[in-house]
Image (spheres, helix red, strand yellow):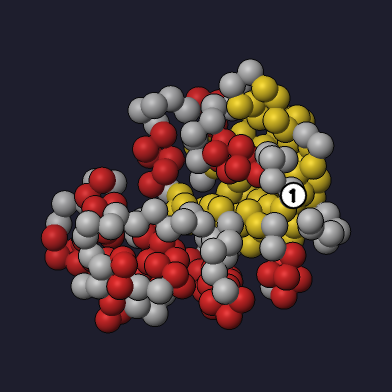
């Protein structure tokens, strides 16, 4: 069995003083694809934010990519995030620079300095997502699906052990959603990255079946049956 890359044990997840999810027990392995499903407001985003260090874990135990979530402080969070890739629903690309410059910005921010190595890495991830010829395009010149591919390329820059995807197909048409889903499954396989994807799109979940974790009424249940509203 592949090694665990995310583990939570009896974890209570808070937003400020509000308990959002209680007694969370969860193990996700290297290379595994997992859906995080549930209605809006049931704690999906809070769980993701805890995994990438935006919300502190103060009760229970947790580790992500070898980092103890209870020990995280502001100095350690950037090191955790170098092992993670985050894919957003709304892409969050910098609109004042082209695709290559968007990706180079992230590399520089995570400690890369060698220009040739940065250029090679950018070409590598753009090739991976099928956008090798689009590096000099500005974000506004790309379709929604292409922008999401750039977002995934950005998430791959540091060869992450975990990819957290927050509703990555939420703004896309069905055909483009299928392309993005195929890409995410391929990434999990090729990079042996665990992919945790928050979604409430039951059509996508049915079409691309995988292990499912549900947030509901303050608890997390594993392998929930599909009835997403």
Q: Which residue is mark 1?
A: 38
Q: In the image, is 156 to the left or to the right of 2?
A: left
Residue at image coords 58%, 80%: 175
Relative height, residue 173 to residue 83 (above, below): below
Residue 25 visible at all: no
Q: Quadrant of the N terminus?
A: bottom right
Q: In the image, is 9 to the left or to the right of 121?
A: right
* Disc 1: CA contacts within 10 A as few (<14), some (14-19) or many (>=20): many
**Where residue 229 appears, x then y in whole percent?**
79, 56
Q: Nearer the viewer, residue 124 or 140?
A: 140
Residue at image coords 63%, 18%: 17
Residue at image coords 43%, 48%: 83
**Where residue 56 appears, x then y in whole percent?**
54, 27
Residue 93 visible at all: yes
Q: Most extreme residue toward the left, as rendered?
A: 115
Q: Of helix, strand and loop, which one carries label 1?
A: loop
**Where residue 169 appears, x then y in whole percent?**
57, 65
Q: Most extreme residue toward the front, as rendered?
A: 140
Relative height, residue 204 to residue 89 (above, below): below
Q: Where, by quadrant of the figure, is residue 207 drawn?
A: bottom right
């Amino acid at each position: 069995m592949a090694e665990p890359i995310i583990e939570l044990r009896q974890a209570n997840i808070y937003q400020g003083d509000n308990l959002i999810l209680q007694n969370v027990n969860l193990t996700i392995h290297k290379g595994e694809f997992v859906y995080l499903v549930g209605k809006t407001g049931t704690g999906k985003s809070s769980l993701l934010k805890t995994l990438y260090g935006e919300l502190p874990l103060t009760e229970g135990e947790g580790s992500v990519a070898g980092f103890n979530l209870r020990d995280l402080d502001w100095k350690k969070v950037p090191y955790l995030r170098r092992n993670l890739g985050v894919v957003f629903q709304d892409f969050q690309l910098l609109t004042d620079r082209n695709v290559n410059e968007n990706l180079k910005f992230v590399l520089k921010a995570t400690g890369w300095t060698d220009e040739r190595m940065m250029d090679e890495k950018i070409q590598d991830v753009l090739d991976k997502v099928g956008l090798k010829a689009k590096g000099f395009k500005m974000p506004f010149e790309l379709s929604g699906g292409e922008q999401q591919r750039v977002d995934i390329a950005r998430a791959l820059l540091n060869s992450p052990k975990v990819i957290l995807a927050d509703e990555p197909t939420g703004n896309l048409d069905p055909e483009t959603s299928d392309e993005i889903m195929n890409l995410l499954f391929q990434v999990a396989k090729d990079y042996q990255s665990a992919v945790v994807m928050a979604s409430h799109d039951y059509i996508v979940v049915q079409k691309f079946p995988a292990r499912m974790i549900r947030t509901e009424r303050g608890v997390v249940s594993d392998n929930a049956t599909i009835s997403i509203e």
